[in-house]
Every structure is written in structure tokens, then in C-alpha cells.
Amino acid sequence: MADHASPRLPGTVCRGAEGAPLVCDASVALTPTPASTRQTPSRPLVAYAYSCGVSFPSLEQLRTLNPQQQPTYPDAAAVDGVVGQLRSRPPLVFAGECDELRGKLANVAEGRSFLLQGGDCAETFAGVTAQNVKNKLQVLLAMSVVLTYAGQVPVVKVGRIAGQYAKPRSKDTETRDGVTLPSFRGDAVNGFDFTEAARVPDPARLLDVYNASAATLNLTRAFVTGGFADLRSIHSWNATFVRSAGVVERYERLAEEIERAMAFMVACGIEDESMRTVDFYSSHEALLLDYEQAMTRIDSRSQLPYNTSGHFIWIGERTRQLTGAHVELLRSVRNPIGVKLGPTATGEDALAIADRLDPDREPGRITFITRMGAGRVRENLPRVIEEVEASGRKPVWVCDPMHGNTFEAANGYKTRAFSQIVDEINGFFDVHDRLGSWPGGVHIELTGDDVTECVGGVNELTEADLENRYETACDPRLNRNQSLELAFTVAERLTDGRINRINPVQEFTPVEF
């Protein structure tokens, strides 16, 4: 596994294309010298071509591009101090892991794997506990085994975890009872409590993001490699699920089938490490540029930039401007990149941003996460897919059935209907089945707890039930039973697709004797 330490000695000075000195220090971030000591480029330069072989934009350059969805901090000096501390912190993920994931996503694009991406809408610092992390992993592992068994292709497991602490907002302020305060933008920015003190953006929270992410990743790695993910523990993954007719019993029957298959394999002398451990990757929206740029480091193997805050990072619907700061930063890093596409997105939009982020058309580099809404997916998605694939590009196509199906209940709670989530999933598969393209994955906001935030599902939650356990810090999530129920819905579509498609993973030609 590659580290990110620069082979240059601390204090070595490199020169950028504009002659600006940069220090290659032991923290491996290329740290621009303070803006006051160098001349600001006269044109909107987006990245230095550094003489030491690397290139990514400085924060000063990104700030000239009118970055969207950024907090307004009251103390610029405090921000600079926090960014400096972040640059000295070790990477949270490694370049080799990002490369490995990019290779697996290339297999997804080719129809050889399926992507399951899920986790909290917005993580909270208070939620960084062993039990919470374990609960989320249990749900994702249970879902992944259902999908693997149905689709008979590997499932790439990516969590919305260890970094999803900031959220874009449609309004900068929130008003309650005549009082207007800054909107809550996630624990990474300000506090949830509706008080003037809590809602002031605090850059020190970015250090808390780093610490919480490090703790979560450390625990996740311990779980998935320490026996918790062993397939022989398949029954224990649903031990805390609420016993409800249909879903849990269906899972138990599936688990028994898998256990029999594993016993047969062991009897045949087939034992493999992949049965005992899983590869699990972290992801989040790359929203806060102070944090994401500070966590961009140079890989010692390739001398290329990687965002070391997460394995997979995505650009949201509100920040995917072609000449915007978020696209500018992410086009310079080597991580696999996701792009959210809403109902107004066109094939031309998708191709333009793909060309910007991935001019070399590298397999596994681009994932399009479509969030059309149940009522529009069958009408809008086909044109996007057709135009993109006609260009010769092979991105990963993923369905986010959550964000296009949010509404306000009569009692004031923001919620989602499970039936609409399922309908968008089905629409996504319908479109791909008709076009002959590969429905590469799903992107789900979920929790490992028995919350009441989305209506419907196997327990038939109603709007009146929402107040019982409405715990989200932002948008409503599927609870663990709803998540498992959704996995079976996706599994049915994968099974149908397997019947109608050649499965490249399972292809076999018998030898004639």
C-alpha cells in the first residue's frame, strides 16, 4: 500500500508556472506560501503546472472561481490556521486504495460488478460510536449479500461514511417564529440548535471532521477485516433487525441457502480470504473546499494528486458548474469521481462535465449518480444515457432514488415515500433494460437504526409515525428494515436482468469430449 510522503526533503522549494514558491514538506501536501508574499495571477489560472511534476489549484485560486455552497466564516485568520493544521495531518485514505476502487468501478461500468453506496444523509459527530458504525455496516453487508446472490456479480461496497458531515442548502438562512439565522450546513460547519451562537460557522469544526472521520475509518477497517464481515456470520448481520413479516424471514431463507452453498465449497476444498473479509470504501460529497483542498496530497509513487479525505468523492447537483471551483479541484485529483445529475440534466451536460473531469476517458473514473425523481426518470434518463453512450463513454450509471422524492408531510416533517423510492429504482432498471445498458448501482440514504423518517415499507409507516423516531440531521433516511426490503427489490431486478443478459462473470463454455 503506497504512502503519500513526498520523496523530497522537508523545506525543499519548488516553483510553479507563475514562479510562486511552494514548500514540499513532510506532510506531503504542497503548501503554497502565503498570498501576501507572492503575486496573484492576473488571469483566472486554474492550476499551476508545478516543476516537481504535480498540479492542483491553490485555495486562493479556487476562491477566485466563485465557489458555491461555502460557509461565510467570521474570522479569515482562523480559517487559515485550521487549513494549516489539516495540511499537517496524515492522509485518511491511501492512493493505492483509490486506484483499487477505480479498477473495481471500471468492472461495474462493464457490467461485471454492481455498486452499493449507502449511509447517512449527514453524519454527526455525536454519531461516531462503535454501535452506530456497526449498525450501518450490518445493514450494508446484509444488503450486499442479497444483491450478490441475486445478481451473481461482485458487489462493490462504498459507504456514505467518514466524511459526509456537510450538506448543501437551498437557502442561506432559516426563519422560525420571525427569527432568521444561518441555515444548518452540517456538523462540519455549524451547530444544529436554532440559536445565534450555534449557527455561527466555525472553521475549527473541520478539525473535528478529520478526527471523526479517522475514528470511523479505523473502526470500519477493524470490523471488515477482523471477522465481522465473514460470510459465516451472515445470520448475525440481521440480529438487531425488527422482526417483521416478509423481509427478515426472506433474508433468513437466503442466508440458509448461502450457508449450504458455502458448506459445499468447503467440502470441495475451496476456501478463500474473500469469504472472510470484504473491501469497503468511504465516500462523501466534496463540498467544503477548505477541507478538500487541504486534504489533497501527492502520492509518492506517481507524484500525482489524490484527495485523501475519502476514496470516492462526488460533486453535487448544486456545485457541478463546468468552470466552477469544485470541478476545478476534482479534475486535478486521481480519485474516482461521482457527479450528481438531476431531472433537468441533459446528455450534453453529462458529456461536458465528463470531458472536463476525465478527458482521457479512463475506465472507472466517472460515475453518474442520477436523481431524477420517480415521476421523471423514465422520461428524462433515456436521453442522457443514449447521448453519453453514443459518444463511446462507459461511465458507471447509478440511481439515487432518494433526493428526487422528498416532500413535506402534513405534520411538517420532511419525508420520502418508500413506494416512490421503489418506483424510481424500477424506472432506472426499466430504462437500462430497454436501452441495453448496465444499471450499475444504487446510492441510498440509510441508517442502521429503527428510525421513522420515510413513510411506507414493510412496516407501513404513516405520516403520524414520523414523530416517533425522527432523528436525521438533514434529510429522511430509510431504516434498517426498509433498507433490506429495498435490497430485495433491487435483487429482483438484477435477477430479471441476469435472465435476459449474458453474465460476463459467470460465462462458461463446457469442454466437448
Image (cartoon, helix red, strand yellow):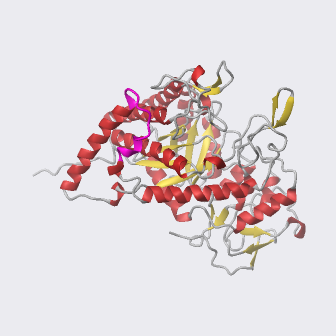
Residue 14, image x, y percentages: 74, 76
Q: Quadrant for residue 224, please give it.
A: bottom left
Which residue is at the front of the view, 48 or 212?
Answer: 212
Which residue is at the front of the view, 321 or 118?
Answer: 118
Residue 369 visible in the shown view? yes
Residue 378, image x, y percentages: 52, 26
Which residue is rendered at x = 85% and y = 62% of the image?
Answer: 41
| Residue sitting farthest toward the top | 410
Which residue is at the front of the view, 50 or 407?
Answer: 407
Q: Quadrant for residue 8, please give it.
A: bottom right
Which residue is rendered at x = 73% and y = 80% of the image?
Answer: 12
Residue 215, image x, y percentages: 59, 58
494 is higher (above) or lower (below) than 125: above
Residue 365 visible in the shown view? no
Q: Would residue 8 be found to the left or right of residue 218 on screen?
A: right
Residue 296, image x, y percentages: 67, 62
266 is higher (above) or lower (below) than 115: below
Q: What stretch is highlighted in magenta?
A: 234-247
Which residue is rendered at x = 45% and y = 28% of the image?
Answer: 430
Q: Does 237 appear in magenta?
A: yes
Which residue is rendered at x = 48% and y = 47% of the image?
Answer: 137
282 is higher (above) or lower (below) than 450: below
| Residue sitting farthest toward the left | 513
Q: Does 50 appear in magenta?
A: no
Q: Would residue 481 be found to the left or right of residue 257 on screen?
A: right
Tag count in the figure? 0
